[in-house]
Image (cartoon, rainbow, N blue to C red):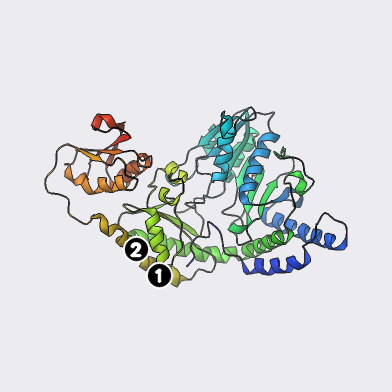
Amino acid sequence: MYFDVASTAPLHPVARQALTAALDEGWADPARLYRSGRQARMLLDAARETVAAVLGARPDEISFTASGTQAVQLGLLGGLAGNRRRGGHLVHSAVEHSSVLHVAERWGSPRPEAGGGAGGGEVSVAPVDRTGRVDPQAFGALLRTDTALAALQSANHEVGTIQPVGEVAELCAAAGVPLLVDAAQSAGRMDVPAGWSLLTASAHKWGGPPGVGVLAVRKGVRYASPLPADEREGGRVPGYVNVPAIVAAAASLRAVRAEAEQENARLHALVERIRSRVPQLVPEVEVVGDPVRRLPHLVTFSCLYVDGEVLLTELDRAGFAVSSGSSCTSSTLTPSHVLAAMGVLTEGNVRVSLPYGTAEADVERFLTVLPEVVAGVRAPLGLDLPAPAGAAGPLLVIDALGKRCPLPVIELAKRIGEVPVGGTVAVLADDEAARLDVPAWCGMRGQEYAGEAPAADYGGDRGAAYLVVRRS
């Protein structure tokens, strides 16, 4: 079963039909005046009108890009360039998609090797709470007289939390700051939030073909293309347009939006079942993300003492394709910036995102398989063994140097019983993920995280010592 539509959705049947027809009818250059070109232009204009109607925009505000990432990058850079007279300050939340973070890193970097330079500026990052939600007032407090652009996603791609875009948009409007909204995860499924100045979306997220993104720029919003001028797509996106794919994207967006109300209610109930049952079926699990203000089809949970990559591999063998924000599933071996910003466990993370048409029986089978898979992954760790009798004293040093997370946390869980209540455990670790996972483990297990100290103070030659006081 495919439970990973937050990454990409299967091609909607309507998209498949529209794509096949458009390959025959819309293959010509829509910029040409001969008959086949005019026919392609009519299809492109109709697709633009459809997308505009669903997203709450005017057709001439819509441009098509090669991907959602390109739409975000062009939107950010074009919005910043268009408002350069105001200043060079950018504000975004800590849980934005990596496409936003990469632009922000380059924009705020003074290093030429990172793409920075005289054209850059400053970047402020709005924190989120433990559910992954931005505080509108905290976001608004970062706006300045030189803020050129603000960016906020409609809903988070890893944990499903819906952001307070409307409230943030009001604060941005009051400050005269344009707001870019990344609606990749919600477009087609939910109403587009009001108040945006620039909006981006990606067709393959709603069941359209890959290779089609949407960039909408409100009339009156200052925008200057960061790329060389081109006459296509309102001068915002250079290059030849893929008319058949755009037609299929528009057709599927309209179809998905028509189905959304009924299907969202059904998927919401299935996800609620997963949210409530997983903690009952699997010990030491935390469901993350906002339990109420969330996407209807997405749920994420973190399993203690589990390697995320191993867990996903075993679930795949059991017939379930799911995703993870765990560091071990990334080629860079860095923790998920979303989970880190939330202050939750970054290891053993599973994201389930249900496609339209998911059957109740498929969810029930997942709930049957999951406890067995997690137990199998945990079995070799010896976590079921009773804690050693007797306490080793008020201080215990665990040398986890050279071990990647979640191993330092596993060692902590296995050995914290060796100190009495009130005793301290110093975990020596040189994996950067331990800085996030040890405090998160303490929060989940009712122990006290006492902070970080130099590893040398506890006999280590590198890394850091993470101090935990046993409270239960």
Q: Residue furthest right?
A: 34
Amino acid at circle 2: Val
- Specify the label residue 147 is tagged with: none
Residue 258: quarter of image: bottom right
Up-down: is 146 above or below 428?
Answer: above
Q: Position of residue 244 (x, y in %)?
A: 72, 62
In depth, the one of 272 and 362 nearer the eye is: 362
Residue found at the far bottom of this picture: 361
432 or 283: nearer the viewer: 432
Answer whether residue 399 is visible to the viewer in this image.
yes
Number of numbered discs present?
Answer: 2
Q: Position of residue 248 (x, y in %)?
A: 68, 63
Q: Quadrant of residue 223?
A: top right
**Which residue is at a point 69% across and 60% down the rendered structure image?**
245
Q: Residue at x 57, y 28 (%)?
A: 110
- Residue topped by disc 2: 373
Characterize the local packing of mark 1: few (<14), some (14-19) or many (20 or more) Cα atoms within 10 angstroms: few
Q: CA distance from mark 1 to mark 2?
A: 12 Å
Quarter containing the C terminus: top left
Q: Is residue 436 left or right of residue 297?
A: left
The dot on residue 365 is 1
At label 1, the amino acid type is Arg
Q: Nearer the viewer, mark 1 or mark 2?
A: 2
Give the image location of residue 151, x and y in percent.
Answer: 59, 41
Image point 12% across, 48% down: which residue? 389
Give the SS element for disc 1.
helix
Rendered view: 120 above or below 388 = above
Question: Looking at the image, is 20 positioned above or below residue 460?
Answer: below
| Residue 341 image offset from top left, x and y in percent | 44, 41
Above/below status of 71 relative to 279 = above
Residue 37 relative to residue 1: left or right: right
* Mark 2 neighbour density, 10 Å: few (under 14) some (14–19) many (20 or more): many
